[in-house]
Image (spheres, helix red, strand yellow):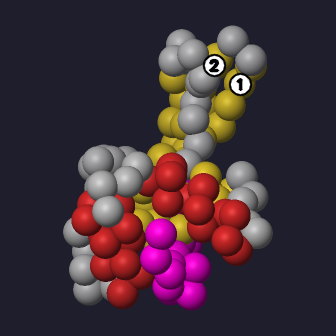
Amino acid sequence: MISKKLNKSTYLTFSGYKEIVELPTQRETQWLIYQDNKPKFFVDVFDLAKESNAMMNSLVLCGKRDINQVLDFINKRNRINLSIPKISRIGIKKKVKTEVVELKVEPLPEEWLAYSF
């Protein structure tokens, strides 16, 4: 389990206020993955020291798949609810406030990734 400093941001959207926990400096190869609408996992496909990240590297980058496609397949296969939250479906949002929080996140379980498409 890894303790990370993350940003907890509140956004105002057409559907009301929405709180999202985000990475402070997000790269295109890093994701904070939610399970049942709560931040639980951290994936960095270039951190190959962790086996699950190496497996995600293979599924996303080598397989030329979108992270959401991989999560959909993992969800169906394992009957779980993993997601990357969207702030607004139509893209209109205004950040109201941000606070730094420290959360414990973990890599995705390897048994969820031990398959081929």
Query: Is residue 2 shown left or right of residue 28?
Result: right
Residue depicted at 37% across the width and 54% down the height? 65
Q: Which residues are magenta?
A: 100-117
Residue 16: horizontal and vertical position, in percent?
A: 74, 19
The residue pinned by badge 2 equals: 12
> Marks 1 and 2, how far apart in space?
5 Å
Res. 25 in view? yes
**Disc 1 marks which amino acid?**
Tyr
Mark positioned earlier in the residue sequence (1 or 2)? 2
Q: Is residue 10 above or below residue 69?
A: above
Quick one: label 1, few (<14), some, or many (20+) residues within 10 Å?
some
Query: Is residue 37 shown left or right of residue 103?
Result: right
Mark number displayed over residue 17: 1
Res. 39 in view? no
Q: Are marks 1 and 2 in contact (CB under 8 Å)?
A: yes
**Disc 2 marks which amino acid?**
Leu
Quick one: label 2, few (<14), some, or many (20+) residues within 10 Å?
some
Query: Is residue 92 shown left or right of residue 63?
Result: right
Residue depicted at 59% across the width and 62% down the height? 73
In the depicted view, which residue is nearer to us: 5 or 41? 41
Q: Is residue 52 above or below residue 87?
A: below
Query: Which quadrant would residue 52 be assigned to in this image?
Result: bottom left
Question: Quick one: SS at disc 1?
Answer: strand
In the depicted view, which residue is nearer to us: 12 or 109? 109
Residue 15: horizontal and vertical position, in percent?
A: 74, 17
